[in-house]
Image (cartoon, rainbow, N blue to C red):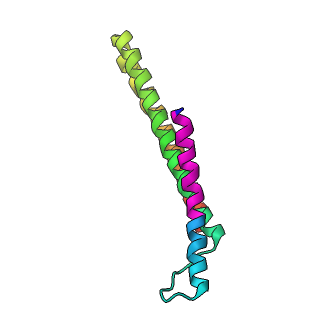
């Protein structure tokens, strides 16, 4: 039930941004005294999509690194003498997850700038 509420809230936020941009564009066309600089709808949606993509990358990377750490700590708790052998592969795996996450964030941000 909680996941459904979260999905509905995210959908409402996603739909609110283009509606706000259209409302600002309508005010400018109506000739009100304060001018609002408007951007094209496609550019606004691209920025919104890139920010959601980057945030999903960060969340997924954090979950992945947390899972790697928790499994390694659990394995060390079961077999403490193997802690030295598990540390280096854990760090390498976490670094690879973080590298992929940062690459995905850069791709999302370059999608907006290009």
Work out whether residue 108 can be spotted: no
- Quarter of the image where the N terminus is located: top right
Q: Quick check: 78 above or below 23? A: above
Report whether 109 appears left or right of 89: right
Q: Position of residue 7 (x, y in %)?
A: 57, 43
The residue sitting at the right extreme is 42
Look at 54% across and 55% down and name the residue there. 13
Q: Position of residue 48 (x, y in %)?
A: 56, 60
- Quarter of the image where the C terminus is located: bottom right
Rendering quarter of residue 100: top right
How many numbered marks have been drawn onto this rendered protein structure? 0
Q: Main secondary structure of the magenta part?
A: helix
Stretch in magenta: 2-18
Look at 45% across and 34% down and name the residue there. 65
Work out whether residue 10 can be spotted: yes
Q: Nearer the viewer, residue 65 or 2?
A: 2
Q: Nearer the viewer, residue 48 or 13?
A: 13
Rendering quarter of residue 46: bottom right
Q: Position of residue 54 (x, y in %)?
A: 53, 52
Look at 64% across and 70% down and name the residue there. 41
Q: Quick check: 37 above or below 13? A: below
Q: Is residue 8 magenta?
A: yes
Report whether 90 appears left or right of 3: left
Look at 46% across and 28% down and name the residue there. 67
Q: Position of residue 79 (x, y in %)?
A: 37, 10
Q: Nearer the viewer, residue 5 or 71?
A: 5
Q: Is residue 13 magenta?
A: yes
Q: Quick check: 68 above or below 35? A: above
């Amino acid at each position: 039930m909680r996941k459904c509420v979260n999905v509905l809230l995210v959908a409402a936020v996603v739909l609110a941004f283009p509606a706000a941009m259209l409302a600002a564009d309508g005010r400018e066309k109506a000739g009100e005294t304060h001018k609002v600089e408007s951007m094209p709808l496609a550019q606004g949606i691209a920025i919104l999509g890139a920010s959601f993509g980057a945030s999903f990358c960060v969340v997924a990377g954090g979950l992945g690194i947390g899972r790697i750490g928790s499994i390694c700590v659990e394995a060390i708790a079961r077999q403490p003498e193997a802690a030295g052998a598990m540390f280096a592969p854990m760090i390498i795996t976490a670094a690879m997850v973080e590298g992929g996450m940062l690459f995905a964030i850069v791709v999302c941000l370059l999608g907006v700038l290009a």
